[in-house]
Amino acid sequence: MNWHFPPTRFVHDATVLEQCLHVLEEAMESLKAVVNEPMDRVAEELWDIVHSGETALRILQRIGVDIYQGKEFVLAKNDKRGYYEIKK
């Protein structure tokens, strides 16, 4: 996995539920930023979601989940739905 951020201490201290709730909190902060802040702040909040999501994935790895299988499933599902730009 090509991580964007280094591991946080929460990889060892948090549960999957706790970290998923944190992802939700970060998502709510990004929505507030879209309405009230300049777009550079929105970008910062979106990166917070990525960072928090990576932490959740690392927690899943810690407990033995094959996160790469999940990624492949999402790629295949979204490709089937036509979400990806067609490469020429």
Image (cartoon, rainbow, N blue to C red):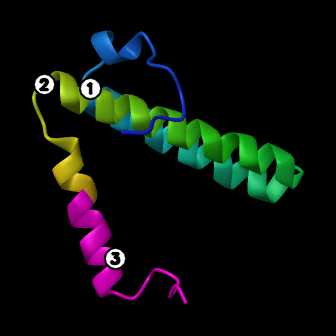
Q: Distance of mark 1 from mark 3, alpha carbons? A: 24 Å
Residue 82 image point, x, y percent: 40, 88
Given residues 38 and 66, the one toward you in this image is 66
Report the side of 56 relative to 2 (left or right).
left
Residue 88 lies, with reference to residue 72, above or below; the image says below
Graded by Cα atoms within 10 Å as few (under 14), some (14 to 19) or many (20 or more), the crowding at tag 1 reads many
Q: Which residues fall within the magenta stretch?
A: 72-88
Q: Which residue is mark 3?
A: 78
What residue is drawn where x is 50% and y is 20%? 6
Q: Which residue is mark 1?
A: 59
Residue 85 lies, with reference to residue 70, above or below; the image says below
Give, as a three-letter code, the residue at label 1: Ile
Q: Which residue appears farthest toward the front when viewing the image?
A: 88
Give, as a three-letter code, the residue at label 3: Asn
Q: Which residue is mark 2?
A: 63
Question: Which element carries disc 2, helix, strand or loop?
Answer: loop
Residue 24 image point, x, y percent: 46, 44
Q: Distance of mark 2 from mark 3, alpha carbons? A: 26 Å
Residue 5 image point, x, y percent: 53, 28
Q: Quadrant of the C terminus?
A: bottom right
Residue 20 image point, x, y percent: 35, 38
Question: Which element carries disc 3, helix, strand or loop?
Answer: helix
Residue 4 part of the magenta segment = no
Q: Quadrant of the N terminus?
A: top left
Residue 27 lies, with reference to residue 16, above or below; the image says below
Q: Distance of mark 2 from mark 1, alpha carbons? A: 7 Å
What residue is drawn where x is 42% and y is 9%? 9
Please report contact status of discs 2 and 3: CB closer than 8 Å, yes or no: no
Report the side of 4 relative to 20 (left or right).
right
Residue 70 lies, with reference to residue 64, above or below; the image says below
